[in-house]
Amino acid sequence: MLLVGLTGGIGSGKSTVARMLEKRGAVVFDADVLARQAVAPGTPGFEKVVERFGPNVLAPGGGLDREALASIVFSDPAARRDLEGIVHPEVRRMFAEGCEEYRDSDRVVVFSAPLLVETGMHTAFDLLIVVSAPVATQIERLMRDRGMAERDVQARIDAQLPLEAKAEAADVLVDNEGTLEDLEAQVERVWRNLVTRAGSGAS
């Protein structure tokens, strides 16, 4: 098993790269999906979040109101650290469990997460891929694709390590400033390299 970390800033195209790798045969674990599972109703994580942040973060259906929670944690670093302290250990546990069946295989296993470098978790991988794009492009994409206000986009970008710092930790840097075709070509080259390394047992 070749264990690959995949990260990048919000709006950089990390999820698009993850889908391209999955299409080519990678096993992809998405930290955002695992994070939602970690705080789903009925889980210990859910109870801890409600205990810490109160009933105002509950949606009418009984789950978490993710927008209400985001508005709190992206304007209060201490609150964000508290939430991460609840969610991150559970995400790591679920990822480790999910990897077990591939442990002795030659599969490429990708963990896609926005905060790999910030948490220091990137050192646990055989290879780190960082997807990069200029801040102006990140803002434009999120306003266009998610309908987010510019100030909300900026707050989320500010909550993450600058992409330049993440790039310094990268083994492979994917530049996503160009077209989707440009990105596909880069991912194809990266994928061939990953398959070769996984097959040879290199890490």
Image (tube, rainbow, N blue to C red):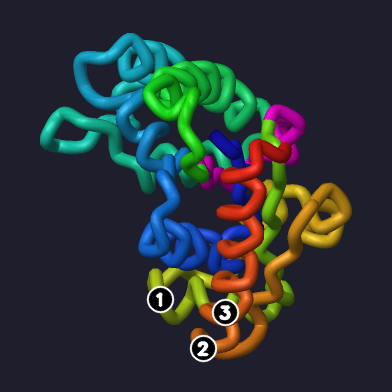
Q: Are marks 3 and 2 in contact (CB under 8 Å)?
A: yes
Residue placed under numbered mark 1 in the picture: 145
Q: Residue at x 70, y 75 (%)?
A: 175
Horizontal side of residue 21 vs 163, given as left or right: left
**Magenta stretch: residue 64 in it?**
no
Indicate the quadrant containing the N terminus: top left, top right, bottom left or bottom right. top right
Q: Residue at x 43, y 20 (%)?
A: 100
Residue placed under numbered mark 2 in the picture: 181
Secondary structure under the numbered disc 2 in the rendered image:
helix
**Front residue of 191 and 137:** 191
Q: Earlier in the sequence, mark 1 or mark 2?
A: 1
Q: Amino acid at mark 2?
A: Glu
Q: Count residues near mark 3 (Cα–Cα under 10 Å), then give few for <14, some for 14-19, many for 20+.
A: some
Residue placed under numbered mark 3 in the picture: 183
Res 53 visible: no
**Magenta stretch: residue 117 in it?**
yes
Horizontal side of residue 70 vs 85, given as left or right: left
Residue 156's place in the image compared with 203, above or below, is below
For the image shown, how many numbered marks are present on the structure?
A: 3
Residue range in magenta is 109-124
Res 77 visible: yes
Residue 105's place in the image compared with 70, above or below, is above
Residue 34: quarter of image: top left
User: Which is more foreground, mark 1 or mark 2?
Assistant: 2
Indicate the quadrant containing the C terminus: top left, top right, bottom left or bottom right. top right
Q: Residue at x 59, y 32 (%)?
A: 80
Q: Amino acid at mark 1?
A: Asp
Q: Amino acid at mark 3?
A: Leu
Distance of mark 3 from mark 2, alpha carbons? Answer: 5 Å
Distance of mark 1 from mark 2, alpha carbons? Answer: 19 Å
